[in-house]
Image (spheres, helix red, strand yellow):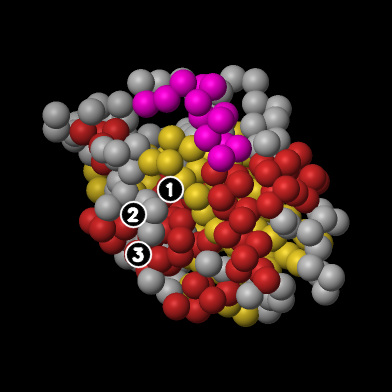
Amino acid sequence: MIPGTFDYHAPKTLKKAVSLLNEHEDAKILAGGHSLIPLMKLRFAAPAVVIDIGRVSGISRIRISDGHIQIGALTTHHTIGSNARLRRVCPVLPETANEIGDLQVRNRGTLGGSVVHADPAADWPAAMMALRASFEVAGPSGTREVSASDFFVDMMTTTIGDGEILSQIRIPEPPAGSGSAYAKMHQSASGFAITGVAAQLTLDESGNVSAAGVGVTGVAPIAYTASAVEDALVGKAPDEGAIAAAAALAADGVQDANEDHHASGEYRMHLATVLASRALASAAERAKS
């Protein structure tokens, strides 16, 4: 199908983009286009105005400074996946990026566009949960910061309000003795996650887990933090037995697992435990080295 007619704007500053968004009642933001354009072609979305933020300066870069990793919302999956410094500092970020779609999708799709779309099978939300990321949102009254745990509200729904635009993602730089990883079972056609688990572990001088972060996508209507897994690991050596026992809790608290022709809810919850075990084992190995 062909999208309906719409007015098109391509601002060059974030301030102008926010202004345009607030001037028009029925407007949508276009970033990489991999979420919005298919919806428009199917007439599931028919905005009167499209605001293309692809030319906005300053929100498509990666910076590591002052104890934080800062990634602009317009940064492409490919840029993140090919960043050598991120592979050293926080390997789960490039690892997750390189699991998304195919090369064409990674070259055009953006981190910000993915997280704002909040698809229950998207990869990035799991990593954002595990890394305790926060989201900087720009609006007519200035900027505000939202934690990853508060950002995802429901399926395809985030806390971003009318007239607001995601500008960047901030992630605490992992301390020494940390390791992270992403494990995923993907849909063969689209590359979306049937289930995906991101993990980050920090080990103390004795080799025990001092901090853990585990995010799960694909299982529930929104990505979630597997708090039971994290709590089960803290204070323990991340050996095979401890990881297996903790990973078994990866679907704890899930009341209404996703069901479709790709997988049943029961299978998705089973995958969560299997993939949690793999991600945790990889994260532990990286933390030790």
Magenta segment? 262-274
Mark linked to residue 114: 1
Mark 3: amino acid: His
214 relative to 120 in the view: left or right: right
SS for callout 1: helix
Name the residue type under label 1.
Ser
Disc 3 vs disc 1: Cβ atoms closer than 8 Å? Answer: no
Give yes or no for residue 35 being in the magenta stretch: no
Count of picture labels: 3
Give the spatial CA distance, label 2 vs label 1: 7 Å
Please name the residue that numbered disc 2 is placed on: 109
Taking the magenta stretch, the answer to whether it contains residue 270 is yes
For label 2, the crowd category at 10 Å Cα-Cα, with few meaning under 14, some 14 to 19 and many 20 or more, is many
Label 3 and label 1: CA atoms lie apart by 13 Å
State the residue lying farthest toward the left: 1
Could you tell which of marks 3 and 2 lies nearer the N-terminus? 3
